[in-house]
Image (cartoon, rainbow, N blue to C red):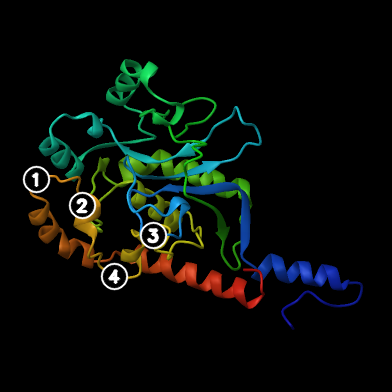
Amino acid sequence: MDFWITGEGVTQAASLASYTAIYFPRQMSRVRLKRIPFWGKGIAHKGGALWEGAPGHYWVEIDHNDPNTKESYGWYPAENIKGMESKKDQLSAMWDVEGCINGDSGARRRADEEGLNKKKKYDLLAGRGIGHKPYPYDPNHGNPDARSVQPLYLGLTDQRSEAEVIDEIRAFAAAYEKQYGGRWSYRLDSFGENNCHTFIWLLLHDCQLIDLELLNADIDPHFDKLRGQVLKEAAKGAAYGGAGIAVAAVTSAARRLIKPDYADTLAERTAMTRDELKRRNWL
């Protein structure tokens, strides 16, 4: 334990605190990663259902200790895809459309206004995007149907304050549209897609954050691809009986196999942090 701060006048408590501050993964108290999976593997998540009745979503929430103050970030298609009458149009739109932070587009706002009296609170399609005061927010902010609610961690030796990290999350979200192409797509769990899963994984990478459940495929089978496994059920999970799904599954196979560098980095950070927490019997 020669890396502890020790010496004359240094108490054991101070020495332990110095070690923890430098070497122990820190859990952030104000930031939560939330998930509503589109489909799942079985009993590990609430209800044990294999299918959801609506598209899933990942987003990140920032707590202001005030239920009336919302701040959150997620990535959405600018089009109201589920409102399209044609299944063929839905499938085409899922492949590649304009994207937006928090679903804040004219089309999605209009859809909310037209169906306002028919919707529940968390059925809204549009939140509020970058520049909204006091803060942007995802339309799912506070949704009690989130099946996974996880705190995020800072890694070993990371000395940033939580306020600094939150500022980095805001900067990431503000730059995302320009930095990552501005498109939204779902391509059968391909690494070539750009949707709410991609947004969160890139946020974790670029802001150097750690989600301990990142590799837990029981929470969401999308995690299998981060572990290097190609989902055999990908086509089944992606299709609501859409036309041409078999062709789509074949053409996306290569994309699913080519992992970007950030995927391995996320998996490595997650494993390292879990191992450290387990070693201390804190997990």
Residue in the image at 43% along x and 55% along y: 206
Q: How many marks?
A: 4
- Closer to viewer: mark 3 or mark 1: 3
- Closer to viewer: mark 3 or mark 4: 3
Alpha carbon separation for disc pair 3 and 1: 27 Å
Instruction: Answer with left or right where residue 247 lies relative to residue 234.
Output: left
Q: Which mark is residue 42?
A: 3
Q: Which residue is mark 4?
A: 229
Q: Which residue is mark 2?
A: 187
Q: Position of residue 256 (x, y in %)?
A: 22, 63
Residue in the image at 19% along x and 61% along y: 255
Amino acid type at circle 4 is: Gln
Q: Which mark is residue 95?
A: none
Q: Is residue 63 visible?
A: yes
Quadrant in which residue 54 is drawn: top left
Q: Which residue is mark 1?
A: 243
Position above or below: 191 against 128? below
- Closer to viewer: mark 4 or mark 1: 1
Mark 3 near mark 4, Cβ–Cβ under 8 Å? no
- Going from the N terminus, do you reach mark 4 or mark 1 first? 4
